[in-house]
Amino acid sequence: MSTQAVLSAQGLVKRFGGFNAVDGVTLALQEGSIHALIGPNGAGKTTCFNLLTKFLAPDAGVIHYRGRDITSLAPEQIARLGIVRSFQISAVFLGLTVLQNMRVALMRQHGDGLRFWRSRRSVDRLNGRAMELLDAVGLAPLADTTAASLPYGRKRALEIAMTLALEPEIMLLDEPMAGLGQEDVARIAALIRRVSVNRSILMVEHNLSVVADLSDTITVLARGAVLAQGDYAAVSRDERVITAYMGSDEEAH
């Protein structure tokens, strides 16, 4: 794993009225790593995530991609750099088959959007890549299945495959385990590990066992500020982290 930061933030601040939802956050996503953003209720995780993906503009601080200041870029410009948030293109079309959903995602990647009037031959050329991606997420046998009939966990896998169609360099996953049963959690965790081989991943995740298993680095937020950073062994022993989680059964947005 490289020590170069592919995505970093210095001194991020976001105010809502007189309240600092994010208060001076600094973090760095290292190339080829899985970095988890966690914290107890009201910690500012999702707000921080929205700042990094430019769904919100920071009131202070800077964001860099490979040393380039991208603080002023719009979300679509961020995506074109290869920084892709999972739900940006992962709205599954329930009336289409799994393979047809992948074709839509690949047409977007090639700048064709939803141009369904393309020739059949042109669309069929996408099938090879679509099947490769479906195979990568374990959905190739379900290619002709209507998306609406997929179990929830398999829909999540399809969303990840559609995100992969954009060929992201950095994947930002917002609560990838939310709503999943234990069997699906294990399946999606294994999938995240597989797809992380050639890319960097930043995720907000509630499931601490998944965080412990997958993450190279963890940033713990509390009241909008960085409480601790390091690997799971280090942050789980940190007295400040233990205190922050006392009485908190779940993490919030």
Image (cartoon, helix red, strand yellow):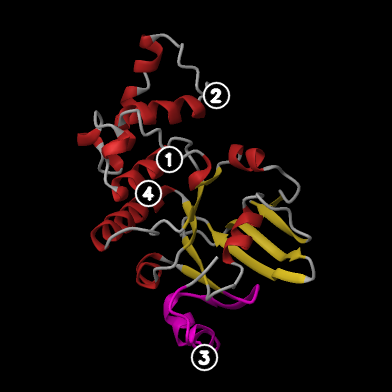
Residue 34, quarter of the rendered image: bottom left
Secondary structure beneath label 3: helix
Q: Residue at x 35, y 69 (%)?
A: 213
Would you say residue 7 sits in the magenta stretch?
Answer: no
Task: State the separation of the CA atoms marked 1 and 2.
Answer: 15 Å
Compared to residue 29, the image places residue 166 above or below, namely above
Q: Which residues are magenta?
A: 221-250
> x, y percentage for residue 67?
68, 53
Say which label, 1 or 3, has the lower sequence index: 1
Q: Which residue is mark 4?
A: 195
| Numbered label attached to residue 52 | none
Check whether the beta carbons of the residues at disc 1 and disc 3 lie within 8 A of each other. Answer: no
Task: State the separation of the CA atoms marked 4 and 1.
Answer: 8 Å
Compared to residue 164, the image places residue 30 above or below, namely below
As drawn, which residue projects farthest toward the left? Answer: 141
Task: State the separation of the CA atoms marked 3 and 2.
Answer: 50 Å
Q: Which residue is mark 1?
A: 164
248 or 125: which is nearer to us? Answer: 248
Compared to residue 89, the image places residue 28 above or below, namely below
> x, y percentage for residue 58?
74, 58
Secondary structure beneath label 4: helix
Q: Is residue 235 left or right of residue 68?
A: left
Q: Amino acid at mark 2?
A: Gly
Q: Which residue is mark 3?
A: 239
Q: Residue at x 70, y 42 (%)?
A: 74
Say which label, 4 or 3, has the lower sequence index: 4
Task: State the separation of the CA atoms marked 1 and 3.
Answer: 38 Å
250 or 4: which is nearer to us? Answer: 250
Q: Amino acid at mark 4?
A: Val
